[in-house]
Image (tube, rainbow, N blue to C red):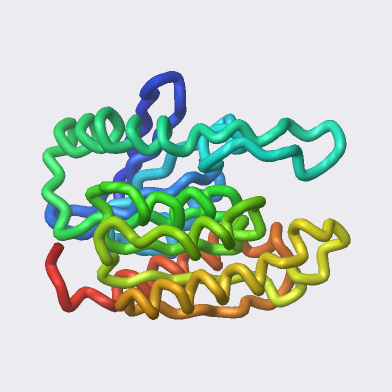
Amino acid sequence: MHKHSHTIAGKTVSAYLPARADLPLLLTFLTQEESDQLAALLNGQAALISVDEPLWEHAFTPWPAPAAFKKAPEFSGGADDNLNWIIRELLPQIEQTHALQPQWRGLIGYSLGGLFTAYAAYQPTPFTRFASVSGSLWFDGWADFIANHSLNTLPHTAYFSVGDTEKNSKNPRMAVVETNTLATRQNWQTQGVSCTFELNSGGHFQDIPQRMAKAASYLLENTAESA
C-alpha cells in the first residue's frame, strides 16, 4: 500500500493505494493515525480513502438536533451537502488522479460517521456496500426516518456493529443506540438487503481501527457481485 496525501476543500484526505487499480474502494472518515492503522490491517485488499473531517456535528448529521453534551456544538444537518461533495468532487478527483477503476465502492463510518453512512444509503450514491460501526443511530428522529423512508438503491451488503456497553450510556438519548441499530438492520433486511450485526466488546471509543477493519473485511468477503 502506498500512501498519498491530498488537501481537498480544505480537508486532509489520505489515499492508501494497492498495486492494482481495479480493487474495491473503501471511503471512511478517520484521523490520520487511525487511517494509517486501518490501512495496515487491510494489507492491500482494497483502496482506502480516508477524510479527516473536522466538523463532525455538521458534516455527518442528516438534520439539525440539539447538542449531545454541554459545551458541545449543536448538530447542524450538513449530511446532504457533505455527500454531494463526496460524489461530485472528492471521488472524481481521487479516482482520476490515481487512475482508479474500482470494482465497487464501499462507505464505512464510525460514530457520527456511521450515522452518515446509514443515511447515505437512502440517497443516490455510487456506493453499494455500507458499514456503520458504533454508528450514532441513537440520533434524534432516526427511528422515525427509517420507518418512513425506503433505501434509494438496495445495497449489495451492509454491516452494523456497536460496543456491548454503549447501551449503558448515562445520556438517555445515546442509550437507545443498540436498539436503534438492531431496528435499522431489521428494516434493511426486510427491504431485501443482506446485512449483519456484530456486538463488539467494550464502549464507544475503543479499538476503532480494529473494529473498522472487521467491518471492511465483512464487506470485502461479500463480493459475489461486481458493482
Name which residue lies at 63% across and 64% down: 207
Q: Tell me which corner region of the image, top left, top right, bottom left or bottom right, holds residue 11.
A: top left
Q: Is residue 33 above or below residue 171?
A: above
Q: Is residue 95 above or below residue 126?
A: above
Query: Seen from this angle, which residue lies furthest top?
Result: 10
Q: Is residue 90 left or right of residue 110?
A: left
Q: Is residue 71 left or right of residue 121?
A: right
Q: Nearer the viewer, residue 173 or 147?
A: 147
Name which residue lies at 58% across and 49% down: 112
Whole-percent x and y of residue 173? 76, 57
Q: Is residue 12 left or right of residue 224?
A: right
Whole-percent x and y of residue 194? 33, 79
Whole-percent x and y of residue 49? 35, 45
Q: Quadrant of the C terminus?
A: bottom left
Q: Nearer the viewer, residue 176 or 28?
A: 176
Name which residue lies at 26% across and 47% down: 124
